[in-house]
Every structure is written in structure tokens, then in C-alpha cells.
Amino acid sequence: MKIIVTGANGQLGCDLIRVLETEDTVVPFSHRDLDVTDNDRVSRVIEDVRPEVVIHAAAYTRVDEAERDPDEAFRVNAIGARNVAAAAEAVGAKVVYVSTDYVFDGKKPSYSEFDTPSPINVYGRSKLAGEQMTAFFNRRHFIVRTSWLYGRNGKNFVKTMLELTRQGKPVRVVNDQIGSPTYTMDLARFIGRLISTNLFGTYHASNSGSCSWYEFAKAIFKEAGFSDVQVEPISSRELARAAARPAFSVLDHQAIRLNGLEALRPWREALRDFVRHDLTEAQKEG
Ligand SMILES: NC(=O)c1ccc[n+]([C@@H]2O[C@H](COP(=O)([O-])OP(=O)(O)OC[C@H]3O[C@@H](n4cnc5c(N)ncnc54)[C@H](OP(=O)(O)O)[C@@H]3O)[C@@H](O)[C@H]2O)c1
């Protein structure tokens, strides 16, 4: 298959390329190569490449900054999604829109694809608008909601935790938000399998199981061999961030079950794999 990946330099974008290029022809576009808010250019590029699939992994992901600049968050996450979905539709390509657990309000212990989203911050609202644009402008769509991503490329919680200890800084982590950490390689493999099907619709795709950010931090130190690091559990109120976060954003993988697809492995197993293999490789590369 010929596949376009947007946001190719992002955490997920990089791993999508690593996973897909072994079997498919991947045409990657970083932010610099293709700004998804430029409708004319998005149309021209997709028309020229004529892919079978467009995986739209580009996004405005700065959750707190989105509160101060909602127009930019909606421009990228909603208008950008419309541009990509419509251009893909025009050449008969399937589209994947990568979305988030933050479309939910966090009042339930877990959310299925059939629950009604009710985001509590600007980022979540802009991503929900992107989902709606995608579904409206491309009939052959997959909306893939995921959560708490980490991987080899870019900044993420795992790298931040390890960096804090290296610098000898105190580690204080919130213990009142529960979710599912997800390894970008596992998500990329899932998306790779999904796009070979015609099982269109919305999917929750996160590593299975759940934990708080505090428990996640403890697990990271354990896997990295720093069991003696002191982690202080704190409340979200103590952290005082600009954007509210859902207290529970565990995604139930109902659509994966109903469509007979393979669920992602437990988060703890994925973390171990990442720390032992991918992270070590990334550190060697500098
Ligand atoms: N990270 C998470 O924990 C998480 C959780 C749930 C869902 N998600 C979703 O998963 C997807 C992938 O996330 P990620 O962590 O890989 O994000 P990321 O590392 O921030 O990557 C996003 C990429 O999009 C690019 N981008 C931003 N604005 C753009 C524009 N106007 N045109 C083209 N490219 C643009 C960014 O480039 P620049 O950096 O140069 O701007 C960046 O390379 C996103 O849809 C995100 O909403 C992420």
C-alpha cells in the first residue's frame, strides 16, 4: 500500500514510519514539509501522491497552551483534520485520525467507543471537532483514540522522569488521574493492522490495564533499575496546570473486541520492552 503519514517527526509519526516501511510504501510529511492547515497544499500533495491511506498523526498537542490559544488548537486539530479527510476522500483514500482519551470528562471509571464524549479542556474539544470533521468529510475513516503516549522520539513522561532523577531533582507526581500508558510502537502496529481492513469506525487503542501517573512513575524507575528513587504522590490541585485533566480516562477497547481484532498488550509489559530496548537504543544514538 502507499501510505501518507502526516506529523512524521512526532512521537507516533516516527514509529508509524518504522513499523510501516517494512511492508508498505510510506510517504512521510513533517510539519515543515506539509502544514495541514494549508488546505490548497494538502489537496495538491494528496492528489499528487494518490495514496491508498492517509494516517493523520499531526496535531497541536500542547494541552496547557491550548487554553491560552484555542484558535490555534482548533485550526490544527479541527480545520487541519477537515483538510486531510476531504483531500483523502477526493482520491478515494482511507483516513486515520488519531485522537485522545481527553475527549471524555473523566467521571466514569472507563469509556467505550459508544459513550458520548464531553471534553473538559480546549485540547479535548479541538480533538473532538477533528473527529467530527474526519467522519463528515471521509466515509472510509478510522478514528483511533489513544492515551498517555510515550516512545523513542520527542518528549514524553518516561523520558522526563528519568531526566529528573539524572539531574537529582525531586520527583512529585499526581496520584489522582488514572489512565493507560501507551507505547507508540504498539499503537503503530495496531494502526498498521487496522488500515488493511475495511472495518471503519471509532476505536479505542491503548495498552491494556491502567494506573495513576504516580504508579506509572514508580514502574518507570523500577524498569530502569532505579528502585530507590523517592517519588512523592501529589494531587492535581497542587500542580495547578492551565488545563483541567480527566480524573479517569481509561479507554475500554470494545470496538477491538466487537471486530475481532487483537488488543494491545498490558502497559507494564510494553513499558519494560521500551525501557530495555528502544530507550537504550535512543540513548546510544544521543
Ligand atoms: N502524546 C500523548 O500523550 C497523546 C495522547 C492521546 C492522543 N494523542 C494524539 O496522538 C497523536 C500523536 O501524538 P504525538 O504524541 O505523536 O504528538 P507530537 O509528538 O506532538 O507530534 C505531533 C506532530 O504534529 C506536528 N504538527 C503540529 N502542527 C502541525 C501542522 N499545522 N501541520 C503539520 N504538522 C503539524 C508537530 O510538529 P511541530 O512539533 O514541528 O509543531 C509534531 O511533529 C496526536 O493526534 C495526539 O493528539 C497523543
Image (cartoon, rainbow, N blue to C red):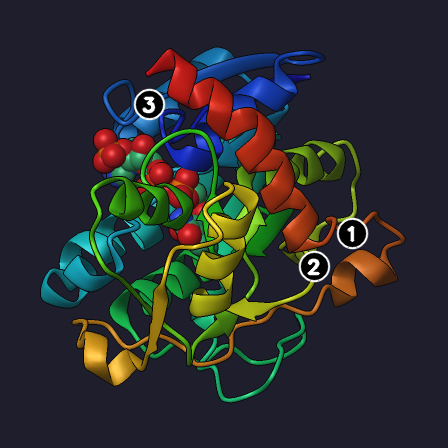
Residue occupying image coordinates x 44% and y 58%: 217
Amino acid type assigned to the residue bearing label 2 in the image: Ser
* Residue holding disc 1: 263
Q: What is the crowding at mark 3: few (fewer than 14 residues within 10 Å), some, or many (at least 20)?
A: some
Of labels 2 and 1, earlier in sequence is: 2
Question: In front: mark 3 or mark 2?
Answer: 2
* Mark 3–mark 1 CB contact (< 8 Å): no
* Mark 2–mark 1 CB contact (< 8 Å): yes
Residue occupying image coordinates x 36% and y 20%: 44
Q: CA distance from mark 3 to mark 1?
A: 29 Å
Q: CA distance from mark 3 to mark 2?
A: 30 Å
User: In what quadrant of the picture does the C terminus appear?
Assistant: top left
Which label belongs to residue 97? none
Q: Is any atom of residue 82 visible in this view? A: no
Amino acid type assigned to the residue bearing label 3 in the image: Ser
Label 1: state its secondary structure: loop
Q: What is the crowding at mark 1: few (fewer than 14 residues within 10 Å), some, or many (at least 20)?
A: some
* Residue holding disc 3: 30
Q: Camera-side residue: 176 or 5?
A: 176
